[in-house]
Amino acid sequence: MPLTEKMPDERADVLIIAEQADDMIGDTLAELIPRPEKPYKASTVTALAEAIRKVVALMDRELESRPYTAPVDELDADLVRYLAAVMEAAESYGKPSPVRAEDVRGDNELIVITDHLMQLSRDRDFRDFLQEEELAEDVAYDEGAAQLIDEEEDMDEMLLRRMG
């Protein structure tokens, strides 16, 4: 049940580059979670993906998920990438996961993480925290863009003075 993000129509070349970067990040993060001694149950990984989907929805991102139908030998890169993002958000909020990604050994650890994420997905304060974080990022981005514009204007003024 790979998680995939619903994307608005964008330029194909930009999407390809973004997907390649996501894959590289996911592959790197996937190495942090040791392969289980025996495959994860499909229902366990399906529940984890659903919990991740619900938390990511609080971040105003929509994921599509399909249930796993067979045992899972290794968590796929997209699932791990989103898991890392929601675990980081939970830690920033002050409620870190009771199980770290590198401590996952089997279904039991995934069940604990899933339960933790489901609790967070229903936590109104967590939702508000995520929205405040997103607003802060937007403001920082806008300030950065404004600073670049100011720097360009300063450069134009300097050139005009030198020419005059």
Image (cartoon, rainbow, N blue to C red):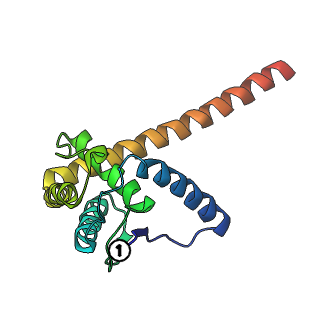
Query: x, y (%) of residue 37?
Result: 30, 57
**How would you rate the neighbour count of disc 1 (Cα within 10 Å): few for under 14, some for 14-19, many for 20 or more?**
some
Q: Is residue 8 visible?
A: yes
- Farthest-out residue, right: 163
Q: How many marks?
A: 1
Vertical side of 56 occupied by 89: above or below: above
Q: Observer-nearest residue: 102 or 145?
A: 102
Vertical side of 43 occupied by 154: above or below: above
- Farthest-out residue, front: 37
Q: State which quarter of the image contains the C terminus.
A: top right
Q: Is residue 128 left or right of residue 139?
A: left
Q: Is residue 26 left or right of residue 14?
A: left
Query: x, y (%) of residue 42?
Result: 28, 73
Query: x, y (%) of residue 20?
Result: 59, 58
Quarter-of-image position of residue 55: bottom left
Q: Residue at (17%, 43%) from the top-left corner?
A: 95
Residue to which mark 1 is pinned = 65
